[in-house]
Amino acid sequence: MSAIPDSQTQPIIRLEDIERTYHMGAETIHALHGVSLTMERNEYTAVMGPSGSGKSTMMNVIGCLDTPTAGNYWLNGQLVSAMNDRQLAGARNRDIGFVFQTFNLLARMTALHNVEVPLIYAGVKRKERQARARQALDTVGLADRMLHRPSEMSGGQRQRVAIARALVTEPSILLADEPTGNLDSSTGAEIMRLFDILHEAGNTIIVVTHEPYIADHARRVIRLSDGQITSDGPSGEME
Amino acid sequence: MLLGETLLIALQSIRCNLFRASLTMLGIIIGVAAVITMVALGTGARAAIDEQMAALGGNILSISSSHWFNRGVARDQDTLTTDDAHALAIESEYFDGVVPEIDARQQVEYGNRNLISTILGTTPNYEEVHLFEVAIGRMFNESDDSARRRVAVLGSEIPGMLETDASSIVGRKIQIRSISFDVIGVLESKGSSGWRNPDDDIWIPLSTAQFRVTGNKLVENISVKVRDGVAIELAMVDIERILRREHGILPGADNDFSIMNRKQFLDSRQEATEVFTYLLAGIAGVSLVVGGIGIMNIMLVTVTERTREIGIRKAMGATKGNIMLQFLVEAMTLCLLGGGLGLALGAGASYFAAEFAGWQTQISFASVVMAFTFSAAVGLVFGIWPAKRAAGLDPIDALRYE
Ligand SMILES: Nc1ncnc2c1ncn2[C@@H]1O[C@H](COP(=O)(O)OP(=O)(O)OP(=O)(O)O)[C@@H](O)[C@H]1O
Ligand SMILES: [Mg+2]
């Protein structure tokens, strides 16, 4: 490591021997088992692998939502395990946009309010907040569903609310855990085009997916199996 | 983040979960209302007795010719006379006033109106000993009494019952038992003393009453005001000595009169009321606890949902402080709102108890504070404690919480 870490020259994400284990009675489950990787600014990466291979777990660690059992994680050159609550909240709020596999929307709030939530914690004033939330919902094609609650929307619509919420703060890193899992192919393609645009704008994108055609949008594909990286290389390079 | 923004989130959260919020508040409302009403009843009952004590005006002993509660069946045993009253007044230095009294229910007429009232024949010092004030006109005096004048002084409610008013009836004539009396005064209201209301009595001089009505020297009752600083027991012994001699009772024989100490009687009632107040407060306390358990229950049931919400908010960039503030504001809002409504409900119930059941009630500040504090504490503890725990988790653990 260089003596003075400079966030511009540091990799945006660096994982070193990350372990995430769960203890189920006597049994120990290694959700992540010695994962090391580096991601540069403006990389577009797809994460693939069978169900239960640790994809979501890795995304949660990268998104500062989960604490690894062992190993080090630097975000923008900063050691995440050394960050305090305020810094972590700031990273989740400003640096990272996270699209959950299970959406995780506030059930009793409207789509608009759900999208506003990250802006509230960013301290954006009410008027601007609503305008930006509307804009984001419009972008994912939900202009006509702003005042619906999650229970009043289809799975695909909920997924798009979750995407709008991740995009609304204009984060430099977008983490999407199967963002098109519930979408028909044309809406899915629409969302992927949106990701392409964000990538061109200089954002770093990591997408978990099972679909090879989605992985094709990415420049880099990481394959996981039983919590370990089995391959890491440019996309199109199928074994 | 601004406090105003947090307040908004909290209020929005309450609005989005209106049903749950109302259930939570219901526990607080019922608890607070119960405590306030119950304690108001107890405090009111005590205050009523305090008033009666004050109205009594010092230590008054009441002598009657038989024990007071079998007065009705003991009519033929009447033994007290005007002479007894004289003897008491002259012989003992322990008394500030001796007031003999006869009473009878009689028909009273004024113009074409009539009513049945208690006519009290007594001496002019009745007013002073029993702390009555004259509102209009005057009390009868010694010369009215010795001359057996037909003059009457009315209780404050009598003019109204005769469909007139105090100032117009003074100087006019009323008929008592068809005998004409001059109304010379109307007294100030004294208020009900518990078992009877002196405001609808009529007073006439004792001699007039004996001459016109009973035709003998018997009286029903003699009130004695004990001089300040004199022990009640000493006064009672003196009364006994004088009356036994007057009545010629042999040593060893029973008294043919009884002496009642109303202050002592009220004191014991006061004690009973105190017990009653604690009992009511206890019952209310139980309902407060039940309300508290209700709050607890709802809070605990929603912990799963709230924990997920906290997970989401943290994942979106909320700090621990943001979360705690939101839940604090939410719990406070519910408690204050519920407490306020409970206070209003309790005050309303107390008012209705006073208005329609005729119980005296008095809302006590301590009960308001107590009820509020308890509900707020329950709401805060069970609203904030799970929130505090969830806010300390990794977002992903909060999201998975079940
Ligand atoms: N909270 C937990 N407790 C115990 N084991 C867990 C927990 N979370 C995840 N695991 C285990 O960790 C492993 C990896 O889970 P993860 O969710 O990362 O898989 P995934 O690759 O995202 O799968 P999918 O494609 O089905 O979403 C799984 O075997 C899972 O059983
Ligand atoms: Mg997954």
Image (spheres, coloured by chain):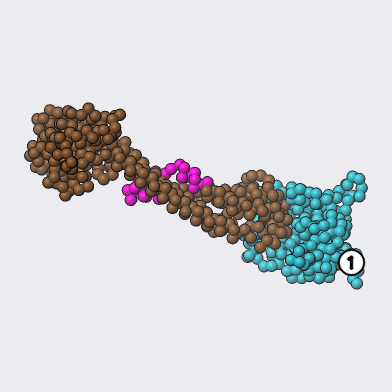
Q: Quadrant of the C terminus of chain B?
A: bottom right
**Closest to the observer, B93 or B133:** B93
B328 part of magenta stretch: no
Name the residue rendered at 77%, 56% in the picture: A67
Q: Secondary structure at mark 1?
A: strand
Identify the magenta region: B347-373
Secondary structure predominantly adopted by residues drawn in magenta: helix
What's the colour of chain A in the image?
A: cyan
Q: Quadrant of ligand 1?
A: bottom right
Name the residue rendered at 17%, 39% in the picture: B251
Badge 1 density bin: few <14, some 14–19, many ≥20, Cα 10 Å:
few
Tell me which amino acid carries mark 1. Answer: Ser
- Is B291 placed above or below A180 here? above
**Closest to the observer, B258 or B178:** B258
The residue wearing badge 1 is A231
User: Residue B317's spot in the image, x, y percent?
Assistant: 72, 52
- Is A144 placed above or below A89 here? below
Q: Is residue B267 left or right of residue B65?
A: right
Residue A200, can we see it?
Answer: no
Name the residue rendered at 64%, 44% in the picture: B3
Q: Is mark 1 within 8 Å of ligand 1?
A: no
What's the colour of chain B in the image?
A: brown
User: Residue B158's spot in the image, x, y percent?
Assistant: 20, 41
Q: Chain of mark 1?
A: A
- Is B305 placed above or below B320 here? below
Q: Residue furthest bottom?
A: A239
User: Residue B34's spot in the image, x, y percent?
Assistant: 44, 51
Q: Residue furthest front?
A: B252
